[in-house]
C-alpha cells in the first residue's frame, strides 16, 4: 500500500497512534501469544504515517503540542 490517505483519515490515524503502546513496551509477558500481532499492527501504522510524510516520532507533539517539551536543539 503506497497511496496517501485524506487529511481527516490521517488525523484520525495520528490520534489513534498516540494511544498505541510503544513497540519497546510490547512484551510476551504483557500481551501473551498475541504480542507479535501487536508489534505488526504498530509497524503497519508507522508505515502508513511515513507514506503520508508524517514522522511517527513527532506525532505526539503534533496532537498534543502543549504536552510536549520544547526541543533542545
Image: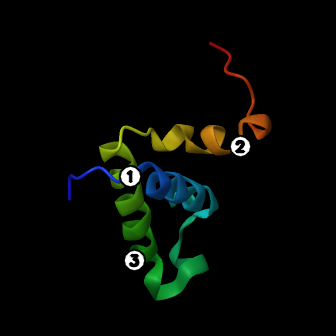
In percent of the image, x 68 and y 16: which residue is there?
72
For label 1, the SS is: loop
Label 3 environment density (alpha carbons within 10 Å; few <14, some 14–19, many ≥20):
few
For label 3, the SS is: helix
State the mark number for residue 64: 2
Label 2 environment density (alpha carbons within 10 Å; few <14, some 14–19, many ≥20):
few
In percent of the image, x 51 and y 77: which residue is there?
28
Q: Position of residue 32 (x, y in %)?
A: 52, 85
Frontmost of labels 3 and 2 is 2
Which quadrant, please, contains the N terminus?
A: bottom left
Q: Which residue is mark 3?
A: 37
Q: Which residue is mark 1?
A: 6
Label 1 environment density (alpha carbons within 10 Å; few <14, some 14–19, many ≥20):
few
> In this image, 45 relative to 62: left or right?
left
- Furthest residue in direction top, as rendered: 73
Q: Earlier in the sequence, mark 1 or mark 3?
A: 1
Colour option used: rainbow
Q: Earlier in the sequence, mark 1 or mark 2?
A: 1
- Furthest residue in direction right, as rendered: 66
Amino acid at each position: 500500500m503506497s497511496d496517501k490517505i485524506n487529511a481527516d483519515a490521517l488525523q484520525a490515524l495520528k490520534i489513534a497512534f498516540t494511544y498505541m503502546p510503544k513497540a519497546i513496551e510490547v512484551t510476551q509477558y504483557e500481551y501473551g501469544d498475541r504480542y507479535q500481532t501487536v508489534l505488526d499492527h504498530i509497524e503497519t501504522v508507522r508505515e502508513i504515517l511515513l507514506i503520508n510524510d508524517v514522522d511517527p516520532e513527532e506525532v505526539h507533539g503534533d496532537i498534543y503540542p502543549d504536552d510536549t517539551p520544547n526541543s533542545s536543539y
